Image (tube, rainbow, N blue to C red):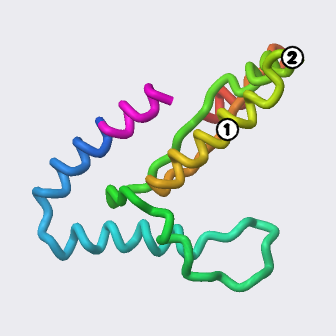
Amino acid sequence: MEDLRQWLEVLQRLTSEMTQQLPLGEQDQLRERVVSTIANFKEADDTSEVTETGSASLVYNMGIPIVVVVTRADGASNLDSQKTAGWSETIEAYLRNECLSYGAALVYTMCQAKNARNVDLL
């Protein structure tokens, strides 16, 4: 988690420097686009109405879409012992909460020895 926070801080610092070079109207437009994307998000199989509550959880709006990729997610199966029961769910909850405050998408990948397709797609 500490590594993720450090990378997000670096990204926040870099985007802050870059967006300061843009006119204020353009900065607002970038941030509004992120808020709009989050507010209008719905699952692929969701048929309900879109609600405007997505921006409430957005704490840090950098004006760019962010994707956090968890590689080697298959390693979570190593945490399925009696001693470490529930750790993978706890780690996943912490990751989700951290990504939620940045409006970041969270993607899990795993590589199986027989099929390296996920790695090729990235």
Classify residue 78 by image quadrant.
Answer: top right
88 with respect to 40 (left or right): right
Q: Is residue 16 above or below residue 14?
A: below
Furthest toward the right, the residue is 82
Give x and y (percent) for residue 76.
75, 24
Furthest toward the front, the residue is 83
Furthest toward the bottom, the residue is 49
Q: Is residue 116 visible?
A: no
Q: Which residue is mark 2?
A: 81
Looking at the image, do the residues carrying marks 2 and 1 touch, with CB atoms under 8 Å apart? no
Helix, strand or loop under label 2: loop
Magenta: main secondary structure:
helix
Identify the residue at horizontal 53%, vertical 54% (top origin).
Answer: 100
Classify residue 11 by image quadrant.
Answer: top left
Q: Amino acid at mark 2?
A: Ser
Q: Is residue 48 above or below residue 32?
A: below
Identify the residue at horizontal 69%, vertical 32% (top origin).
Answer: 109
Q: Amino acid at mark 1?
A: Glu
Q: Is residue 121 visible?
A: yes
Give x and y (percent) for residue 9.
32, 38
Mark 2: few/some/many CA within 10 Å (<14, 14-19, 20+): few
Q: Earlier in the sequence, mark 2 or mark 1?
A: 2
Identify the residue at horizontal 33%, vertical 60% (top origin).
Answer: 63
Residue 96 drawn in magenta? no
47 with respect to 105 (left or right): right
Give x and y (percent) for residue 28.
25, 72
Give x and y (percent) for residue 104.
50, 51
> Alpha carbon of mark 2 to alpha carbon of mark 1: how far?
17 Å
Q: Which residue is mark 1?
A: 92
Viewer-proximal residue, 103 or 116?
103
What range is drawn magenta here?
1-9
